[in-house]
Amino acid sequence: PRSNVVVTPVTLRAAFEGAFLIGAALNAAQFSGRDTVGATLVRAQFNTTTSENVLKWQAVHPLPGTYDFAAADRYVAFGERNGMFIVGHTLVWHKQTPSWVFQDSSGRPVSRDTLLVRLRDHIHTVVGRYRGRIRGWDVVNEALNEDGTLRPTPWLQIIGEDYIAQAFRFAHEADPDAELYYNDYSLENAPKRSGALDLVRRLRNEGVPIAAVGLQGHDRMDWPTPAQQDSTVAAFAALGVHVMITELDIDVLPPDLNPYPDSLPDSMQQALAQRYAALFAVYLRHADAITRVTFWGVSDGSSWLNNWPVRGRTNYPLLFDRLHRKKPAFEAVVGVAQQAAAR
Ligand code: 9MR
């Protein structure tokens, strides 16, 4: 009889099946078993995970010759137990990289050759350890300035422009089957976007194995516009690389203020839901090019945006609230997927 029909609640992973993978960045809270409700939610809703912090250089390679994979191993094991497409973040960045990497024992900058050896050792060790298990890597993160030129990091200053290509080659040597990505933020803005397009074109012309560009997606209520998002995805897809939204969240707070310490007003919940729906409508239109959409965190309480650009605020950037309950934005995002599927 009909009354016995069990209605299974729609999940994100089911809603976007056939369009793109849908994921979240994880921290120890979820994969160490401390936050069991969060872990259950991750298993139910997502089919891909990214390491928010545990695979960064400082975390896995804090001292010369000293690697510490304890947390990273747990992250990968969690993904394997739960059938996730496991992403590693990140191999080359200017942040969370210890200063010893760029210095000799007396504190002077190392030579290009020494730094290349260190980069190769790091990438071979980290990527090699998880060969065949971590399926995609953010190889280089945030290498561009807002004007589209290369950011003056120690990587650029000591090795030169080819540090990016070298990092991709080392990663490819360590795991020829892993997908390799360039990941950055604000690529929706014209000058940075054109710098990134040039970079990807150059890498492709040199035969560097870059599979996709990650648009981080640290968005605001009014930026990027759906049109900016649309043209940005299209521009990268036209180069023949896949596109991924890799660190999605929407900052709802005004600069420097903390107006909603207890809860988000209903009008704002609805506005956030509409904003998420508009972005996902763009992603779905580009489902041929977009292979993955990953949120930067699981629930509002663990988002980095509670502590940036101001520490200790109460932000509401994700689809699940501080008790891991679905927000109106969750229903809106699922609704967009269902409408698209019905067409
Ligand atoms: O969310 C991460 C936060 O916990 C770390 O303290 C921070 C350190 O710089 O990095 C955050 O993640 C960043 C990511 O690695 C790269 N893109 C921007 C993310 C937000 O800052």
Image (spheres, grey):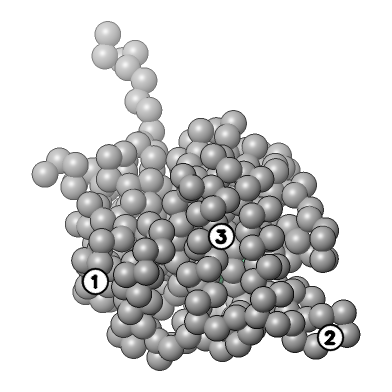
Measure the C-alpha gap from mark 3 to mark 2: 26 Å
Q: Which residue is mark 3?
A: 170
Locate residue 102 relative to residue 124 in the image: left or right.
right
Instruction: Mark 3 or mark 2: name the one nearer the start of the chain.
Output: 2
Q: Nearer the viewer, mark 1 or mark 3?
A: 3
Q: Nearer the viewer, mark 1 or mark 2?
A: 2
Would residue 227 be visible to someone looking at this image?
A: yes
Measure the C-alpha gap from mark 1 to mark 3: 27 Å
Q: Position of residue 336 (x, y in %)?
A: 25, 51
Residue 107 tag number: 2
Q: Nearer the viewer, residue 84 or 129?
A: 129
Q: Quadrant of the N terminus?
A: top left
Instruction: Mark 1 or mark 2: name the one nearer the start of the chain.
Output: 2
Locate residue 248 relative to residue 155 in the image: left or right.
left
Label 3 beta carbon less than 8 Å to ligand 1: no
Q: Nearer the viewer, residue 264 or 51?
A: 51
Q: Residue at x 34, y 67 (%)?
A: 204
Q: Which residue is mark 1?
A: 235
Q: Residue at x 70, y 68 (%)?
A: 118
